[in-house]
Image (spheres, rainbow, N blue to C red):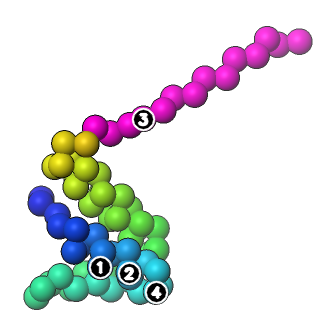
Amino acid sequence: MTYTLAQLDVLKCALATGERRVSFGDKTIEYRSIEELQAAIRTVEDELARASGVPTTRQIRIDTRKAT
């Protein structure tokens, strides 16, 4: 699905105000929890980044210590 920056802004505004219901044009979505809304925001951000060609950066940290 193709997302827009306007949709991302609506989701972030809903999160900032504590709303769980958002409307995009003629469609209304009610999220069950704030965590579900945050997951939707991450999904939209990832899709927008992928569509713009920005590579996803991931970091893996490994901590090794000798057992004593």
Q: Which is more N-terminal, label 2 or label 3?
A: 2
Between 2 and 52, the residue placed more toward the observer is 52
Q: Mark 2 sits on what residue?
A: 13
Between 54 and 36, the residue placed more toward the observer is 54
Q: In the rendered structure, which amino acid carries the disc numbered 4?
A: Thr
Query: What type of secondary structure mainly makes up the magenta span?
Result: loop
Q: Mark 4 sits on what residue?
A: 17
Q: Secondary structure at mark 4?
A: helix
Classify 20 as above or below 52.
below
Q: Secondary structure at mark 1?
A: helix
Residue 21 position by quadrant: bottom left
Q: Residue at x 28, y 84 (%)?
A: 22
Q: Which is more N-terminal, label 3 or label 4?
A: 4
Would residue 5 appear left or right of 58 to someone viewing this image? left
- CA gap between label 2 and label 4 equals 6 Å
Q: Are marks 3 and 1 in contact (CB under 8 Å)?
A: no
Residue numbers of the magenta segment: 55-68
Q: Secondary structure at mark 3?
A: loop
The 10 Å Cα crowd at callout 1, few under 14, some 14 to 19, many 20 or more, is: some
| Residue 17 locus on image (x, y percent) | 46, 86
Q: Mark 1 sits on what residue?
A: 10
Q: Mark 3 sits on what residue?
A: 58
Q: Residue at x 18, y 49 (%)?
A: 52
